[in-house]
Image: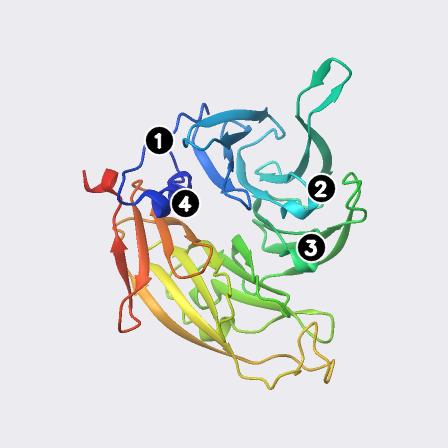
Amino acid sequence: RVHCSRILVRRVMAEAHAGVAPMEHGHLDVIQDVSYNYYGKRIATCSGDHTVKVYDIDDDGQQLLTGDFKPHCGSVLRVAWAHPEYGAVLASCSEDSTVEIWEEQVGRATGSEQIPSEWVHRARLTDSRTAITGIEFAPRQLGLKLATCAKDGQVRLYEAMDVMNLSSWSHLEDFKVRGKGQCNCLSWNPARGYTMLALGCSSDAKSTNIQVWELGGSKRWTSVIDTQFKVDVAEVNDVAFAPSMGRGYFLLAAACGDGSVRIWKIRSTSAPGFGGADAIGDQTRQQRYDCEEVLNSLDHAVRVHRVSWNVTGTKLASTAEDGSVKLWRTDLLGQWRVSEVPISERD
């Protein structure tokens, strides 16, 4: 049984009216995560069988296996692509408490011989002492940086010391989430001018299971919004900031263990130039934000595992433990509702 249905999410967005065909993934155990690259033409999958696979998608929608490697000695929990400006770079994290970084060497011709492309292992990050549950590369404007979160609640930030040589990564800093639970997932805010992470946690102290941290003018990571979320669930499995697309606010979605999908609208209440990592005003003060919940739906009858936005941040896909996928968008009154259900689910 496929634990994560994100493998359907973007195909559903493009083909909601044409149906969704199953994909022959070749894994021998549960699929834990699926990630599309920047252009949506390549898929990386990871599984409980300790493997990571990479597929190229042709113009007919057919998948060709182009990478198959076993980087970990435990279940692989997440995979993430870097921005293509830095090449084809892929990171994976695992229950074995490591992060592995891979880079594709593009094939080339040498005389009459054609050398095919191959994936090369570049680095292993071993700072964690517990399972690493989430990874994500930073938005392009922040450089080649990688954020990780672990079962012990520790969040770590890394940066490639030389983007032309990915064998060396600098451990920039780390911080621990508020509360005593574990950190399950994270998401970078893609908006320019902000260095911000959303974190999803699991703990009995439900009020701290959604947290937003920001690298402010003091150059320190600070929790800035978590007390406003009023989360009443013990488990948050996924969080995702929407692409900003020039909005005057941020949208943050969460997949929750109680079967709910939630969206918050986050606005800065600080004057322009106030605090923030790129501010030109007082460099020691912190941005202030207001948070409004705009969706709290239990349409999924079981635990929700993943949420993912389209490229404009106007449509959200959610996927649950039973393999169901739902698409959300605003109606004419600005209310978030299920707009489409994939044909394969209706059948």
| Residues packed near mark 3 inside 10 Å, few (<14), some (14 to 19) or many (20 plus) | some
Which amino acid lies under the numbered mark 4 shown in the image of this protein?
Answer: Arg
Q: Quadrant of residue 7?
A: top left
Query: Comparing marks 4 and 1, which lies closer to the viewer?
Result: 4
Residue type, numbered disc 1: Arg
Mark 3, secondary structure of its residue? strand
- In the displayed structure, 17 sits above or below 261; it is above
Crowd band around label 4 with a 10 angstrom C-alpha radius: few (<14), some (14–19), many (20+): some
Q: From this viewpoint, is residue 259 visible?
A: no
Q: Which residue is mark 4?
A: 10
Along the line of sight, the residue nearer the viewer: 66 or 205: 66
First reached walking from the N terminus: tag 2 or tag 3: 2
Q: CA distance from mark 4 to mark 3?
A: 28 Å
Residue wearing tag 2? 125
Q: Looking at the image, is mark 1 or mark 2 earlier in the sequence?
A: 1
From the viewer's perspective, tell me whether residue 261 is left or right of residue 141: left
| Foreground of the two, 152 or 237 | 237
Q: Earlier in the sequence, mark 4 or mark 3?
A: 4
Q: Secondary structure at mark 1?
A: loop
Task: Tell me the mark number nearer the camera, choosing from 4 and 3.
Answer: 4
Q: Nearer the viewer, residue 20 or 49?
A: 20
| Residue 203: assigned label | none
Per the model, the C-alpha gap separating discs 2 and 3 is: 11 Å
In the image, residue 324 above or below residue 179: above
Which kind of residue does numbered mark 3 sit on? Leu
Name which of mark 2 and mark 4 comes first in the sequence: 4
Q: Earlier in the sequence, mark 4 or mark 1?
A: 1
Label 1 Cα crowd, 10 Å radius (few <14 / some 14-19 / many 20+): few
